[in-house]
Image (spheres, rainbow, N blue to C red):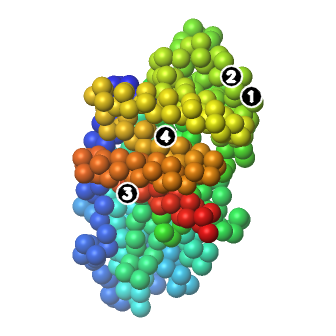
Amino acid sequence: MRKIFIVVILFCTLFMISSCGIYSNPNSLITSPKLNGKDISTNDNTDDIIRKFLPNEFEVLSKDEIATSKSIEFIDIDNDKNNEIIAFIEKDDTKGFMILKNSGGLWQKEYQKLLKCEFITNFAFLNVFDTSKKSIIIGFSINSNIGAEYDVYTYEDNGIEERNIGTWNKFDIVKNLEVDGNEFTIAGWRKYGYDYLIVDFIKLDGKGAYLSNDYYPEYYNKSIEYYNNMLNDMLKYKGPTYFAWYGIVRTEIRSGNAEKALNELETVNQIKGYFPLTDAITDLLKAQTYIKLNKFNEAQETLDIAIVKENNDANNKNFIDETYRDLAYMYIENARLSEKLSNKEKAEEMLKKASDIFNQLDKNNYYHTGGAEMKFYKELDLNTINNEHRKLNKNDK
């Protein structure tokens, strides 16, 4: 459950990110200046080539404004055995990059993206969606509060295609196709009130993006260290400990440490009531713990209570859309539990309730009020529902 200030943060996020989208220029919309053989001699160097394609008043990005300290990259993005030039550029508070390609002796601007941001936080060239094709990942830091927008650029038949993979305050690649063979997964940390972060794992493939709980055990040490440090700071400076305890219990549950989580919930029960440890969310954490302990009946009873509380909150608060999205994920949790209890009918009922909420949010323009970030959340929500339906039908065969 989020309080009103979370909505303020969300509103600011959407405003800032929506302002970024208008600067994105697919190659189909760019009139690419071309140089003929007379323009490019064997003596022309990279700087000369880049200079001829710079937008008006732009210059090559300073090396101290990109995490790699490299403003120019040479990579073969289209797999034609010839390197393209990736040049990061800037003008005032607008930054971005352009891809320059030499085709038959003619240089042209293949792609360009410009947006208002403070820093280029990430550049990587690796296999993301396909083992036979590499993609570029670039992070554009909007500001320290909102985080950075991360996008993937892949060369397809129609040119460079851009795909947003979320806006995160911290970003790690935890699985990649080159090392792990069959999947690409990121750990995305986002602010969950004030300056506190929670982490989610996102699997990516050529069909979509999916939330995953598979990597919490592997990521446990990094995650639990963050929340323990937060808790120690809060105790030291006598600050509220709600966020730290929420993060600790959430991490323990998703990492499979159910007994430990159950003991920690005893402490949580003594301090609950404030965001994010509302009554409904505390009950949800308890239900998730029971599921891990295979206490399905106790989990069902607790989860039913949590859903009633969450419904009441959704009907009585101004930030209805965000609260209903939380409720949808409670229904999904209930569907998973019902499947474990061999109650397929109830599982289908719960998935329908969750799907109805996502569809209603779509009609309410919840996913359309911002830029790429909200479209990405829509993709995550719908793919999660579709995956649950597939698993339910697969297990029924």
Q: Position of residue 237 (x, y in %)?
A: 58, 10
Q: Nearer the viewer, mark 3 or mark 2?
A: 2
Amino acid under label 3? Gly
Amino acid under label 1? Lys
**Helix or strand or loop: what does disc 1 sit on?**
helix
In-front residue for pair 283/341: 341
- Residue in the image at 72% along x and 22% along y: 263
Question: Please, is residue 76 above or below residue 24 in the view?
Answer: below
Say which quadrant the C terminus sits in: bottom right
Q: Are marks 1 and 2 in contact (CB under 8 Å)?
A: yes
Q: Are marks 2 and 4 in contact (CB under 8 Å)?
A: no
Looking at marks 1 and 3 on the same chain, the residue that comes earlier in the sequence is marked by 3
Q: Nearer the viewer, mark 2 or mark 4?
A: 4
Q: Position of residue 13 (x, y in %)?
A: 34, 40
Q: Which mark is residue 260?
A: 1
Alpha-carbon span between mark 4 and mark 3 = 39 Å
- Residue in the image at 29% along x and 55% along y: 21
Q: Which residue is mark 3?
A: 96
Q: Nearer the viewer, mark 4 or mark 1?
A: 4
Q: Residue furthest top?
A: 238
Looking at marks 4 and 1 on the same chain, the residue that comes earlier in the sequence is marked by 1
- Residue in the image at 38% along x and 32% along y: 311
Looking at marks 2 and 4 on the same chain, the residue that comes earlier in the sequence is marked by 2
Local packing at callout 1 (Cα closer than 10 Å; few below 14, some 14-19, many 20+) is few
Q: Are marks 4 and 1 in contact (CB under 8 Å)?
A: no
Q: Which residue is mark 2?
A: 264
Q: Which mark is residue 330?
A: 4
Alpha-carbon span between mark 1 and mark 2 = 6 Å
| Quadrant in which residue 256 is drawn | top right
Amino acid under label 4? Met
